[in-house]
């Protein structure tokens, strides 16, 4: 079996611990060649040289945004994850008294195939659903369902904020997106004064966890305490998000476990499943349906594009003939656009990919000089498709 780089196999999934005290990524000093690539990819200086040989280490877990960009860009495979639920999930899948629910994110289905020999970016959503069933998950409630819910909520909030400007107690503009946990932690740490600008919406997985244990439990006549929810993400920071103490709106832990794309591939290989021979299958109903707007969440600009589609139709009262708002799609840097909305005027938007770029837009907002209504920020360059939990590009290890 070909190993999956960056995957640790021992269970180390602490409960009830402040996630800010945990090392979600760490450097293996025996492999570190002191090249400094990790420092280049760290937006917050959380990873630094610690001795004369230049060996690197994450020096402060609270300053680490857990994005994992250091891990996927290290040429020497010297960075590993510090928290894994894989062994615990295998145990839960064997337990007849536990109903195990899988909740895969949009970008996972564009990264997973690479672990099984497909070209980068190949869509393998159908086989992913089939593999989850073969692994023994009782339900596949797809995170794309709540990506759509996020858009309805976040787009509606944007419309409300725009309309209430000039009124007493109006919430501030620009509104920031709130679905990327690396960005949310960055704002909490470095720009706490801008939190009123953050959308009040949870991320898609932040919504799906409690829905699984309330609506999903009710619809399937399953006691909520028997449900074990597994978030499957392109992302290491989502492990941090799942552990946040406030993620317990269902009356239980909303998200019991989080794994990333690499770990899902590891589980499929460990179970001996022939991934490439799997038929294409869909998710389970109840919390499984979604639209194309959910899928584009995986790319930088995708959340913005989906929210603008909603805002355009509500503000103008007109149908958007072409739903592609390509001008907001971006793979690097900062992208800005003026979107003309009939009967309203111009909606000014910005999309930032990477936290250094986020800081530039935040400084502008802090100085009262931001012209935008809505700003999307994703920690990983190009968005979640390039997340820290995705397969490692073999060319990076070869460089
Ligand atoms: Fe996670 Fe996506 Fe944010 Fe990267 S951009 S930290 S993958 S949510």
Image (tube, rainbow, N blue to C red):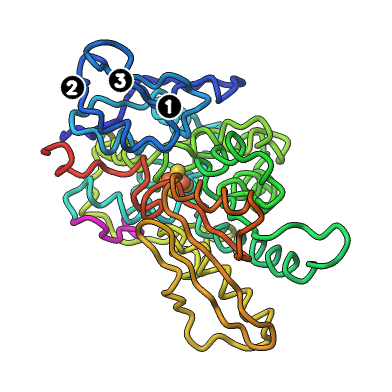
The percent coordinates of residue 190 (x first, y second) are: 58, 36
Asked whether, in this view, residue 354 is left or right of residue 201, the answer is left
- Residue marked by disc 3: 56
Label 2 vs 1, first from the N-terminus: 2
**Callout 1: 10 Å neighbours few (<14), some, many (20+)?**
some
Magenta: main secondary structure equals: loop
Please state, as top left, top right, bottom left or bottom right, where the C terminus lies in the image.
top left
> In the rendering, at what x and y percent does residue 301 appear?
46, 63
From mark 3 to mark 1, how far is it between C-alphas?
10 Å
Q: For mark 1, what is the residue? A: 46
Where 260 falls versus 317 (above or below)? Answer: above
The alpha-carbon separation of the residues under discs 2 and 1 comes to 18 Å
| Residue underneath mark 2 | 33
The image shows a total of numbered marks equal to: 3
Residue 140 on the magenta span:
no
Q: State which region is magenta.
A: 119-127
Mark 3 or mark 1: name the one nearer the start of the chain.
Answer: 1
Q: Position of residue 19 (x, y in %)?
A: 55, 25
The residue tagged with tag 3: helix, strand or loop?
strand
Q: Residue at x 32, y 56 (%)?
A: 110
Q: Residues within 10 Å of mark 3 (few under 14, many from 20)?
A: many
């Amino acid at each position: 079996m070909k190993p999956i780089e960056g995957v640790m196999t021992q269970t180390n999934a602490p409960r009830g611990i402040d996630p800010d005290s945990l090392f979600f990524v760490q450097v293996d000093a025996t492999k570190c060649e002191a090249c400094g690539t990790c420092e280049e990819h760290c937006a917050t200086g959380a990873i630094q040289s610690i001795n004369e040989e230049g060996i690197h280490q994450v020096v402060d877990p609270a300053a680490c945004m857990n994005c994992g960009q250091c891990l996927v860009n290290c040429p020497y495979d010297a960075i590993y994850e510090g928290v894994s639920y894989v062994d615990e999930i295998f145990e839960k899948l064997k337990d007849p008294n536990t109903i195990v629910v899988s909740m895969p994110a949009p970008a996972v289905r564009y990264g997973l195939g690479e672990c099984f020999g497909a070209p980068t970016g190949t869509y393998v959503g159908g086989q992913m659903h089939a593999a989850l069933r073969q692994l023994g998950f009782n339900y596949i409630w797809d995170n794309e369902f709540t990506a759509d819910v996020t858009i309805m909520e976040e787009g509606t909030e944007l419309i409300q904020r725009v309309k209430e400007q000039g009124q007493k107690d109006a919430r501030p503009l620009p509104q920031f997106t709130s679905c990327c946990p690396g960005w949310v932690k960055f704002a909490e740490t470095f720009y706490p004064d801008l939190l009123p600008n953050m959308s009040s919406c949870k991320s898609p997985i932040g919504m799906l966890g409690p829905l699984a244990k309330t609506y999903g439990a009710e619809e399937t006549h399953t006691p909520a305490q028997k449900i074990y929810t597994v978030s499957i993400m392109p992302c290491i920071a989502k492990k941090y998000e799942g552990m946040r103490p406030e993620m317990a709106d269902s009356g239980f832990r909303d998200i019991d476990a989080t794994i990333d794309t690499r770990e899902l591939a590891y589980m499929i290989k460990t179970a001996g499943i022939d991934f490439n021979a799997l038929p294409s299958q869909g998710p389970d109903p109840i919390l499984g349906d979604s639209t194309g707007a959910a899928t584009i969440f995986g790319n930088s600009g995708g959340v913005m594009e989906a929210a603008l589609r909603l805002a355009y139709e509500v503000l103008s009262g007109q149908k958007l003939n072409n739903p592609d708002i390509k001008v907001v799609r971006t793979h690097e840097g900062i992208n800005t656009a003026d979107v003309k909305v009939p009967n309203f005027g111009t909606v000014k938007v910005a999309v930032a990919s990477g936290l250094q770029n986020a800081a530039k837009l935040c400084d502008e907002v802090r100085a009262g000089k931001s012209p935008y209504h809505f700003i999307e920020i994703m920690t990983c360059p190009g968005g979640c498709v390039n997340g820290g939990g995705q397969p490692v590009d073999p060319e990076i290890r070869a460089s």
